[in-house]
Amino acid sequence: MTVKLPDTFTYERRGQVAVMTINRPEAMNAFTADMLRGMDACFEDFNEDDDLRVAILTAVGDKAFSSGMDLKEAIPMLQSGDEMGYEDHTKRPFSDVFKPIICAVNGFCIAGGMEFLQGTDLRIAAEHATFGLGEVRWGIIPTGGSHIRLPVQIPWAVAMEMLLTGKPISAARAYDIGLVNKVVPADQLMDEAMELAETICQNGPLAVRTAKEIAVRALNLEPGFVMEKELGQRVMDSDDAREGPAAFAEKRAPVFKGR
């Protein structure tokens, strides 16, 4: 890979497993545009390298997997119609990666972090991890695919609860509803993720990759992604979408007007 990665994202090869690590713990591992570009380059390399069979996505620290996009960068991007950096609105995080991706969640997994989680296939969570999509509380919506992916990954009523109330859920509840595969003590998180990755690596690589590709393509999510972009833009263009983030930054309650 020729792309120079930012210090906030690392890419390590452990045999046939690629370990991708978000490294911005001082900012709750919030994404920046540079970090997203680096992540895209790493996953493109992973997808094209026949020697790599499984990826693990995790983060540094014990507080947050990711709190989503850095607010200073996120709002201008979303209001301009840029869905988490994707110019092709039929795509969302990892939607065109057909090798297995394991997410090792080490803390808060909220907003954009939760949207990236939904693009992974298998999830291991630390016991203290929490999961949430709090955007509606600030007059905006998550436009990284959550409206399309979440209702097919967990029960409808729970997906609507998360999308409409903005309240997070615990790791225990995430396990109960099938959002994650396993909940473990924090000090066992990476060992569990590596054990799962190595189990998959023992299987036929063509069979594994094809199994995922069939499952993903059969969902036919692309039309929904386009609709999410089109309808979501009217929210991002609204006065409420300017008021909410301003209130968040000023640490006050937002005053919404529904327009």
Image (cartoon, rainbow, N blue to C red):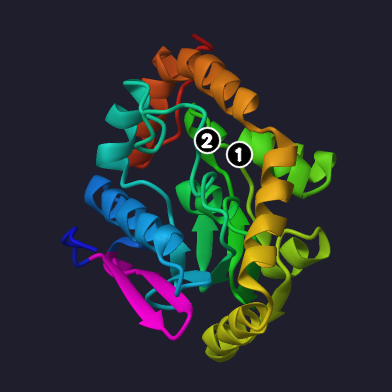
**Kind of residue at badge 2:** Pro
- Taking 7 as reference, is 108 left or right? right
Q: Are marks 1 and 2 in contact (CB under 8 Å)?
A: yes
Q: Is residue 20 magenta?
A: yes
Predominant secondary structure, magenta span: strand
What x and y, as percent, mark residue 110? Answer: 52, 53
**Badge 2 element:** loop
Callout 1: helix, strand or loop?
A: helix
- Residue beneath the point at 39% across and 34% down: 86
Count up the numbered dots.
Answer: 2
Q: Amino acid at mark 1?
A: Ser
Residue 242 appears in the picture as rendered: yes
Question: Which quarter of the figure has residue 26?
Answer: bottom left
Question: Between residues 20 and 48, which one lies in front from this camera angle?
Answer: 48
Say left or right for 7 vs 231. Answer: left
Query: Which residue does the numbered mark 2 point to in the structure image?
Result: 142
For mark 2, does the 10 Å Cα neighbourhood hold few (<14), some (14 to 19), or many (20 or more) residues? Answer: many
Report, in whole angstroms, how far the alpha carbon at label 1 lies from the one at label 2. Answer: 6 Å
Q: Residue furthest top?
A: 259
Q: What residue do we see at 50% from left, 69% from top?
A: 55
Position of residue 197 relative to residue 24, above or below, is below
Magenta-colored stretch includes residue 125: no
**What residue do we see at 43% from left, 20% from top?**
236
The circle on residue 146 is: 1
Q: In this orientation, does residue 250 appear?
A: no
Q: Provide the residue span drawn in magenta.
A: 8-26
**Residue 54: percent from left, percent from top:** 54, 71
Residue 229 vs residue 210, the one in the foreground: 210
Q: Which mark is residue 134?
A: none
Give the x, y percent position of residue 245. Answer: 37, 32
The N terminus: image quadrant: bottom left
